[in-house]
Amino acid sequence: MTTPTHQHATILEVAREAGASKTSVSRYFSGERERLSPNLQTSIAAAAQRLGYHPNRMASGLKGGRSRIIGMLVADIRNPFSVAVMHGVEQACRERGLSLMVCNTDNDSALEREHLALLTSYRVEGLVMNAVGSLDRELQALVEQGTPLVLLERELSQVEAEVVGLDNARALDLALDHLQARGYGELLYLSEPPGLASPRQARLTRFQQGVAARALAGEVHCQTLGETESLNRAIGNFLARPGTLPKALLCANGNATLAATRALHSLGARLGETGLLGIDELDWCELVGPGITTLAQPTEAIGRAAVECLMRRRDTGGRTMPARRVHFQASLIPRGSTCR
Amino acid sequence: MTTPTHQHATILEVAREAGASKTSVSRYFSGERERLSPNLQTSIAAAAQRLGYHPNRMASGLKGGRSRIIGMLVADIRNPFSVAVMHGVEQACRERGLSLMVCNTDNDSALEREHLALLTSYRVEGLVMNAVGSLDRELQALVEQGTPLVLLERELSQVEAEVVGLDNARALDLALDHLQARGYGELLYLSEPPGLASPRQARLTRFQQGVAARALAGEVHCQTLGETESLNRAIGNFLARPGTLPKALLCANGNATLAATRALHSLGARLGETGLLGIDELDWCELVGPGITTLAQPTEAIGRAAVECLMRRRDTGGRTMPARRVHFQASLIPRGSTCR
DNA sequence: GCCTACGATGGGAACGGTCCCATAAGTAGA
DNA sequence: TCTACTTATGGGACCGTTCCCATCGTAGGC
């Protein structure tokens, strides 16, 4: 019945309404307000108010070459850790007047490629991602075009970009020291398959080194976490094996902790008697049984740091800086699951 | 050292490289590929490949008036329920070749206004939101401008838009029937302050009606969930009160369930003996004590439905359709927390 | 064999901003 | 009083697309 009453007002209409030039209106809305006389300012403000004017970001992004958008490629949006980091990224963006465009790749490499192309097509001014697949070529092209890139956690050998993430070696040392101090002597490290994801690789490696250095017995079990039965079997075998020392599970991330807790639950194991320590703090860790000991990551800070890197790189103009790694320290939250 | 090798290629450069006109290249990239002769198609494809061309969405959004972006305003990005819905929205968008721009309002009404203006300035082709504050005026303006709007859960009386969400009345009936069948006779309903959020209001009202209809004893406690001590006190009082019938807590959403579980945990209450039923299913509900009984919402479906409404409304051109409400049914997942 | 129609292609004017440059008026210095 | 410089404002080209409107063959109908 009713058609849209009026379209969006343009800068020209505001200019006419205010009796000013479009240049002045443009200035008013792009942070050069103080260059205008007070009179002009008020009449522009009034005109814009009357017409319900909102600057068209598509247009300004086009001419100015600045979209004011930061892109973020998240491997798994349903992982609370990712969401927490994203929250930090978002806040940092907001403080700088940037918008965030988030794409979820669902750990799918094809989807990742697709979404990367999408973000590129919006000419994002920076990209934060935790890489899934092997997009080295595309990413390198992006970097060479001058788009700042920050990798969360997972690094890609081929691409020149900053990496922001946990100090995995120290984190694993912390975990192993704690388990050893609590008297656990046989450890099972549980992780998703490391594949190309470098933090998984880094943690795994350090686990193996650390176990050897401390003269502990350490095993590793990697699998896709969806397959419940095979996980139950693996953990069951580990627990059933004759051994003199107390046993503990060490989980490489939040998903692994969830899967391990479920498995222990269904096997009827008692937390504490069987040790459990997870990397990533989750809402519910304090609530399950005697509580689950975790290594908390400073998620918010990681997100903010990512944006800071982006901005620094943008301001120094592209590739002038060497790629760096920004490390954050995990903090141990001891609970009953590592207390016999 | 090295400056960006080359900027983004434009349609004109591709055209030159392919020996075609920019119109043809434009057609190639905007779904009119079949209008071009096979020869031209291959040479354009080759040229674009060589130059690493990606269409500039800013420019096409400008001229065509279609940004191909759907905006989403989420009240609390750290709520797993919101994330799950968002995942559904995202998938539905992707299937239709739309991008999603998500803004988190952190339950802050000022931030919500700000982000709404932002999304408007990108000329989003549709908006999905769960409203926090009272943006009725702004939203009404948006709708009149022809932007399709879908509200998640919370409805706004003043604005003509579809609402997608849970059938709250049925959900509460389901919960109350279950609690009654399990023998709980004194109930405490726990919620964040309803304020303007209509689903909170709807659930609360139905709780009160339902309790009366079933001749149960029902109390309501509303508070901001961050304040732990006052929550503990309220729940402690409820449990300490002399009474003949078993007592149970009914939590209005996932956040309330988390807060209640923490409170019960710190009060040393035994789940089951004290009943606990939460709306929203969470990863960890099966793991805490004997498991927490929940009402699961079909999150994915809700998200997809929101996008469907958006598209339907867009295709019928603005306001031609009356505002509707799309209801989804919750499903009960019985666990030990409602078993004495 | 001419006219029409249609399919394939290209030229060029928007779209709504930004930003370079020009202009005009005032102000200070000599 | 004249020049030099600053400040407040406006004109207009341009950003990379889309899309309307040619243009140009060529095939079919008469």
Image (cartoon, coloured by chain):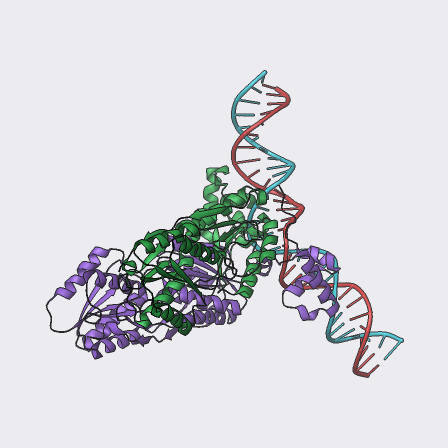
Chain colours: A green, B purple, C cyan, D red
Q: Residue at x 56, y 51 (%)?
A: A61
Q: Residue at x 58, y 48 (%)?
A: A64
Q: Residue at x 63, y 65 (%)?
A: B30
Q: How many marks?
A: 0
Q: Is residue B104 left or right of residue B172?
A: right
What x and y, as percent, mark residue B183? Answer: 18, 77
B279 and A137: which is toward the camera: A137
What x and y, as percent, mark residue A206? Answer: 44, 54
Quadrant of the drawing holding the N terminus of chain B: top right
A121 and A271: which is toward the camera: A271
What x and y, as percent, mark residue A200? Answer: 46, 58
B132 and A331: which is toward the camera: A331
What x and y, as percent, mark residue B107? Answer: 35, 57
Q: Is residue B331 left or right of residue A306?
A: left
Residue A299, can we see it?
no
Q: Is residue C21 above or below residue A136?
A: above
Quadrant of the drawing holding the C terminus of chain B: bottom left
Residue B171, can we see it?
yes
Q: Is residue B139 above or below residue B247?
A: above
The answer to which image quadrant residue B45 occupies is: bottom right
Q: Is residue B216 above or below residue A320?
A: below
